[in-house]
Image (cartoon, rainbow, N blue to C red):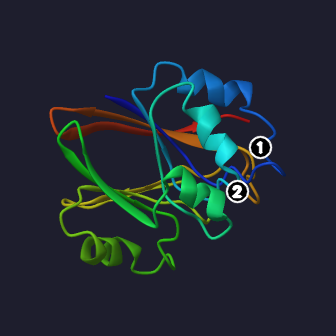
């Protein structure tokens, strides 16, 4: 299963339409995860043209994103791997332990909010922030995440530069 992870698209201010480099990553995805701050549900509809989409609500998302079906948190099995997603995972200090407590069954927690790409793990849990493809803030590049899940295992997690 190939999963593309995006967050913090901040439409329409930052995301007018899907950037070509992002579209290149979305082609061939089995699933798209959006970790919040979509800002308008139209982005989720646009993403759905590439693959099924699951999304959580970010602090800048309005009622239309909730009406689309985004929840504050999400927990699901993806190809047998237990995955959780939320927008804001809190301060960097103690994040891995805090996510283990918040989602004890999860093997992977996806989040956004900081716009800072992160891939961190210990023997039990991996936490993954794809950064933002369109609002890089102090980061050198816009980014998305690409995950490959096989037989209930996360076999690849990459941060991909898209700008």
Question: Label 2: how many residues lie within 10 Å, few (<14), some (14-19) or many (20+)?
Answer: many
Q: Earlier in the sequence, mark 1 or mark 2?
A: 1
Q: Residue at x 19, y 61 (%)?
A: 124
**Quadrant of residue 59 within the rendered picture:** bottom right
Residue drawn where x is 30% and y is 75% of the image: 102
Q: Is residue 19 left or right of residue 32?
A: right
Cβ atoms under marks 1 and 2 closer than 8 Å: yes
User: As drawn, is 113 to the left or to the right of 141?
Assistant: left
Percent across and percent down for residue 58 are 59, 65
**Residue 161 in sight:** no
Task: Give the SS element for disc 2.
Answer: loop
Q: Which residue is mark 2?
A: 39
Distance between the alpha carbons at the discs numbered 1 and 2: 10 Å
Residue at the disc numbered 1: 15
Q: Residue 67 in the image: x percent, y percent? A: 56, 56
114 and 13: which is toward the camera:
13
Q: Is residue 147 above or below residue 41?
A: above
In the figure, is residue 81 to the left or right of 62? left
Figure quadrant of the N terminus: top left
């Amino acid at each position: 299963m190939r999963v593309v992870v995006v967050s913090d698209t901040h439409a329409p201010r930052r995301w007018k339409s899907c950037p070509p480099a992002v579209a290149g990553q979305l082609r061939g995805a089995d699933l798209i995860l959006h970790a919040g701050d979509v800002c308008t549900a139209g982005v989720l509809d646009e993403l759905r043209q590439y693959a099924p989409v699951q999304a959580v609500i970010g602090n800048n998302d309005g009622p239309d994103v909730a009406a689309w079906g985004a929840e504050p948190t999400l927990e699901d099995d993806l190809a047998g791997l237990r995955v959780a997603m939320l927008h804001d995972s809190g301060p960097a200090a103690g994040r891995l332990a805090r996510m283990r407590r918040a989602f004890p069954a999860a093997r992977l927690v996806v989040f956004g909010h900081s716009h800072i790409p992160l891939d961190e793990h210990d023997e039990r849990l991996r936490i993954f922030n794809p950064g933002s493809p369109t609002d890089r803030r102090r980061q050198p590049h816009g980014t998305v995440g690409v995950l490959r899940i096989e037989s209930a295992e996360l076999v690849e997690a990459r941060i991909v530069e898209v700008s």
